[in-house]
Image (cartoon, rainbow, N blue to C red):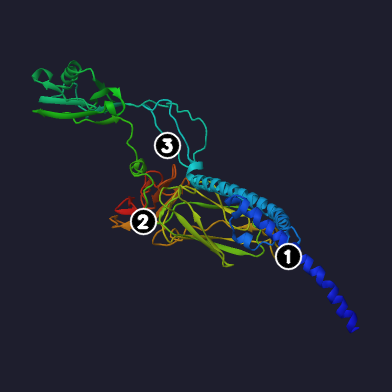
Amino acid sequence: MTEINTTTRAGRQPQAQAQAQTQQQQLLQAQQMQQAAPTSARRGPEPTVASANRLTGLSSGLNTEQTINTLMQVERRRLKPIEEQKATTLQELQAFDIVNQSLTKINATVEQLKGAGIWEGKLIESSNEQVVTATATAGAKPGKHTLVVDRLALNHQIASQGYETAEGQIGTGKFLITVGNGGAITVVVDESANSLTGLKDAINTATKDVNATLIKTGSRTAPYQLVLTSQKTGSEGRIKLDVQLRGGTAPNFQNSVEAPSPWKGVGEAAAAEHAVPKNTGASTAIAQVIGDFTGTADNKFTFTAVQTGTVGGEKQMQLRWQDEKGRSGMLNLDALHYAAGQPLELVDGLALVFSEGDVIVNDSFSFKAFTQRSSLEWWVPSEERPAHVTRPSAWQRQTSEEFGAPVIDGTYTGKSAQRFTLAVQGSGQVGRGDNLSVHWSNSEDGQSGVLNVGQGYEPGTPLGLTDGVTLT
């Protein structure tokens, strides 16, 4: 074996020498070609980091550059769906941002429209604003309203006291007449006009705005009167006199036919609209319960005024309510939230309706609600078995002696004891109801009278009966 191996190794030496010679020749040829080539070609491409780490096929036998490029293309294909999804998501985000901006604008507009005043506001027009103008509250019903003159304003007319004869001496001097806002008209009364007849003729000569007439009444002692009638109607024709006569019985003129002036209190709301009442007296607003009671147990509801105000007025007006179950809430009765006569939802199927009127702070009222009664409860009357509610009680102040009950006062000046009887005529709220009055009479001499306590009466104002007695 040793001999064979030695022979083999010796036989391979010539082949190795031949290969070495061949490689040397190849290197010489390469050097000669490199010297013959231009400088730029001999230099070749500038080395880079990538080329420094790249293994060409000359050393490894593999085309690594193509392999790497192919792998990178594959990786890029895997990234393409992600990049497309990214672009789609960005578009969605931009769309959501646009929608959000639009919703913000809509919300700002809705905030401006949620106020009740915008929807409850009323627009009113007059066909002739020089004749009549009007305002609309939240409770005004849409429609066309026509005003018809039922009666024209009266001519102002005044009459003198009675005289025994038409030639009764009235004195001499000046008789000044003013009609409406015009200037004073001076009528000179001399000796020729020193009588009722002479004054009548002098007035008719001096002015056309006033007509003077002499009438004869049925009086036995002084039947003759001088009557002055304005030729203009209404307040523009009101007659004012300044009598400056001496030396006789000057005429004393009093109203004969004149439209009555408004009751005290009527029209004051126009000067101070929705004026808040003082914290005195009792509440006047009337409450009514409507609806079918759906509660599961009997209950009692109590309402207390939080502020002093007027139902449907401009000032804030609230009622706090609570029941025996511990529930509570607030009812708003001012013009922004309520108009008199409209129902206000409560609970358990019930609602409240309030009339116009005043409400005094801390004043209260209540009502009770009863559930359906079983037929087994034989002791309950049949009319009381269905679910029902009681009528609201009177305001607490109305039932107290201090605020609600009539007050009799004054110093009695009669000669003997008397018994006074009072009876209410009509219905409504004190100080507001139409044709609401109190009829009174006494037992001694049969005297009687009627006192207005409705529209025009200011609650709390004493009214005279007789013999120094007053009613408030």
* Amino acid under disc 3: Thr
Look at 30% across and 57% down and name the residue there.
412
Look at 89% across and 82% down and name the residue there.
3
Q: Nearer the viewer, mark 1 or mark 2?
A: 1
Look at 46% across and 56% down and name the residue there.
318
Q: Write down the residue under mark 2.
A: 418
Disc with the residue nearer the chain's start (3 vs 2): 3
Neighbourhood count class around disc 3 (C-alpha, 10 Å): few under 14, some 14–19, many 20 upward: few
**Residue 110 x/y as whole percent:** 52, 46
Residue found farthest to the bottom: 2
Q: In the image shown, does 311 or 409 lie closer to the viewer?
A: 311
Neighbourhood count class around disc 1 (C-alpha, 10 Å): few under 14, some 14–19, many 20 upward: few
* Amino acid under disc 2: Gln
Q: Nearer the viewer, mark 3 or mark 2?
A: 3
In the shown orientation, is residue 461 left or right of residue 86?
left
Question: Mark 1 and mark 2: span between their CA atoms?
Answer: 51 Å
Disc with the residue nearer the chain's start (1 vs 3): 3
Q: Write down the residue under mark 1.
A: 378
Q: Write down the residue under mark 3.
A: 135
